[in-house]
Image (tube, grey):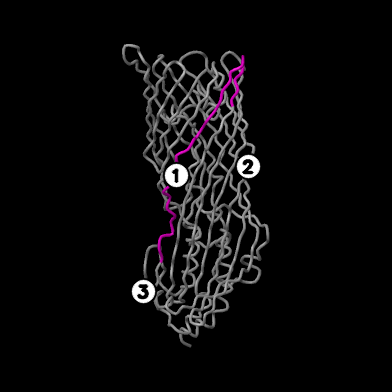
Amino acid sequence: MNQVQLVGDTMVRRVAAAALVIVWSLAGLPVVAQDPQPGTGPGPMAPDRELPPLSGFPGIPFNFGPPGARSLGMGGTFIAIADDATAAEANPAGLIKLSRPEISVHGRSSSIDGEILDLNAVVNLDTLNRFRQFQPRLEPNTRIGNAFANDNKAKIDHSVDEVAFASFVKPMGESTYSIYFQRSADFSSTNTFVAFDDSLLDLYQARQRVDLSLENLGVSAAFKASTNVSVGFSLRYSLLQLDALQETRLDYLSDLELDHLSPGASLEEVQALGIIDQRITAEIFDSEAHELTFNVGLLYNPQGKWSLGLVYKDGGDYELKGREEQTDCLFAMPMGVTSCEPQDRNAATTRIKVPDFLGLGFAWRPTDRFKAALDINHITYSDLTLAPANNPDVTQAVRDQFEDVEDAVEIHFGLEYIFLVGSKRQPLTVRAGVYTDPDHDGFRELGEDETITTAGLGTVLMENFQIDLAAQWGGSVDAGILSLVYRF
């Protein structure tokens, strides 16, 4: 039996297996690119089954730090300082320090430059290699004979200018109240993966697009618990918006081209035949979900040279609705046949758990003009672990490319010094800081622990108006913040 005949004998089984592989790989669920044994393998799709998170969510740069320029300039420390409107997020207990009403707006310009692994591309390449079981393994960005595969990593090159925080604060006797808006995430990534198997003349294509944002609308209150202790809380309406597409296309899966070409032909030769049978499976999300989340804090300030703060932030658990679509197409140009038939349209859901945050802060002020601060933050990044990393039904080749995402501890340190400039002794505040950003992207070969450097300047104009600038650099996210505060 020659190779073409062997391929023809296995065609029916390959088509059935390929259909399951594409549907389940797109959903990020168990994938086994072989004939399932009785009682094993993926079962039929349920209309409303629960789906794991889409590829790449561990790498989303959620902004867990305080949103203001003063904080950023001091390395993201603010838990034990918390003496402006951004305390509503940094540590709401600090709002009690504000003695006058104020309005503040904080603009953020950020640039994200990095990459994440495209789960669809990883599964497609693994599927291809399982069908090439007697051929050399095809790796990303390689070519073997006429077989090839491009990069299975999604590039992130995303810049955004936005209002990161805005608030109104009103002190009232022994308590202080605030209403505020915050945008804590704004993320975008795209990728297109293409691979061609010259032994079975199959063309694999995966397309990914993810746009995600997270906004909070909150109310805060702070109270004096004793002379040296204040407590505060924020209640937030948190809105997560997701616009995402994961699409897989498998061309030439029925092997009609093998009636005209032998294994080993190039993609150009296959395309020249003008006969394409194609299966397109897409998972589509264009939805939003909201949660009531909260933020509680405590501030101990013995009216001396140091203070201590403690804060806990609830991230929220969001369920997003989407759909799955599958379409089979046949394009036979020589015969003038063009046909696309929808096969399935099913509802789908995915769940995103935003990590929780626990922070402990210390501040030391030996003089009226010098301040040092240290924050130690614990973030539950394990809430973002990708399902394929621990799913025993996913092939080992796919599983090996992921790693468990562990909870992380970030260390933030910052300094501030006030210079008195000119004959009017105008205050000019200079800030500098550094903090750690542990690897939490969930991909074994990507990412590393980062050390971020920050710096900032600030001054008060006309006693009522304060302006601060800060920037960070040294990691995958470069950012600058401009903060404007007006006090009545």
Disc nearer the start of the sequence (3/1): 3
Q: Secondary structure at mark 2?
A: strand
Q: Is residue 420 left or right of residue 248?
A: left
Q: Could you classify mark 3 by the number of other residues whose Cα lies within 10 Å: few (under 14), some (14-19), or many (20 or more)?
A: few
Name the residue: 35% across, 13% down: 425
Tell whether position 160 is magenta: yes
Residue 188 percent coordinates (x, y): 48, 48
Residue 421 percent coordinates (x, y): 33, 16
Q: In the figure, 350 relative to 355: above or below?
A: below
Q: Residue furthest top?
A: 423
Residue carrying label 2: 290
Residue carrying label 1: 439
Tell whether position 306 is magenta: no
Distance between the Cα atoms at labels 2 and 3? 51 Å
Q: In the figure, 54 relative to 124: above or below?
A: above
Decide: marks 1, 2 in contact (CB < 8 A)?
A: no
Distance between the Cα atoms at labels 3 and 1? 37 Å
Q: Secondary structure at mark 3?
A: loop
